[in-house]
Amino acid sequence: EVQLVESGGGLVQPGRSLRLSCAASGFTFDDYAMNWVRQAPGKGLEWVSGISWNSGSTDYADSLKGRFTISRDNAKNSLYLQMNSLRAEDTALYYCAKGTRWLAFDYWGQGTLVTVSS
Amino acid sequence: EIVLTQSPGTLSLSPGERATLSCRASQSVSSSYLAWYQQKPGQAPRLLIYGASSRATGIPDRFSGSGSGTDFTLTISRLEPEDFAVYYCQQYDSSLYTFGQGTKLQSK
């Protein structure tokens, strides 16, 4: 059974940093691209970032302007999102999602909530 | 960046009826990279359709996707009570993904 479990969310002050993690199991992690998608309270889905199976390619939503960094550790079956210079508008539930060869996301975690507030 | 616009914003139907949800792109999208998701309150999204028309594993055949270019459609042939949810389309182009704003399908 595929499982994706996010962690690392919480309450953080504007301008501070936070690192999210996603622990994967139930599939061959290093065969697949992985992604982060976020959802602000009561809002729609927003793709944040994606990383290829071997970390050779990373992509980001234009709106992030270089503040976030995605990475993965295939030996640990883990995905990460380093978030710097956090803003109130980054407040959201952050999902980890497994990519497919058709560039859709077939498995999602339950999300970790990030709240940026003073 | 390709913008996806979903319509209607809210759709009110009864169980047993047919639902037709639209997703229009600001420029042509590869059909291979157009997907649909369902999200229920308090739950993560679930992949329904990928490649514009292929059902994901375990998705009932009452769900179907169609379209090409800039116009795509998700059809639910006969609504079941568990189908009332929010639906999102998604596309991939030039290393970026975008989602539509969602259509809320509610019970009349």
Image (cartoon, coloured by chain):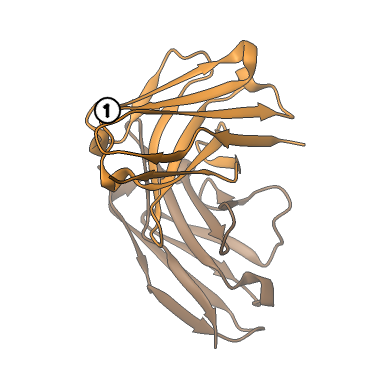
Chain colours: A orange, B brown
Q: Does dot 1 land on a helix, a strand or a loop?
A: loop
The residue under the point 26% across, 38% down is A14
Instruction: Say which of A48 and B10 sits in front.
Output: A48
Q: Is residue B59 above or below residue A70?
A: below
In which quadrant of the rendered view does residue B5 lie?
bottom left
Residue carrying label 1: A67
**Screen quadrant of the N terminus of chain A:** top right
The residue under the point 57% across, 30% down is A22
Crowding at dot 1, Cα within 10 Å, few <14 / some 14-19 / many 20+, comes out as: few
- How many numbered marks have been drawn onto this rendered protein structure? 1
Q: Residue furthest front?
A: A118
**Screen quadrant of the C terminus of chain A:** top left
Instruction: Say which of A114 and A75 sits in front.
Output: A114
Chain letter behind tag 1: A
* Relative to A16, A97 lies left or right: right
The residue under the point 57% across, 60% down is B42
* Relative to A64, B68 lies left or right: right
**x and y, in percent, of residue A34 in the image:** 52, 29
Q: Residue furthest right?
A: A1
* Relative to A17, A23 lies left or right: right
Asked whether residue A87 appears in the rendered view, the answer is: yes
**x and y, in percent, of residue B94 in the image:** 32, 32
Q: Is residue A5 above or below residue B68?
A: above
**x and y, in percent, of residue B88 in the image:** 46, 58
Instruction: Say which of A77 and B24 sits in front.
Output: A77
In which quadrant of the rendered view does residue A70 lie?
top left
Q: Amino acid at mark 1?
A: Arg
In which quadrant of the rendered view does residue A100 lie?
top right
Asked whether residue B80 appears in the rendered view, the answer is: no
Instruction: Say which of A5 and B102 sits in front.
Output: A5
The residue under the point 57% across, 52% down is B44
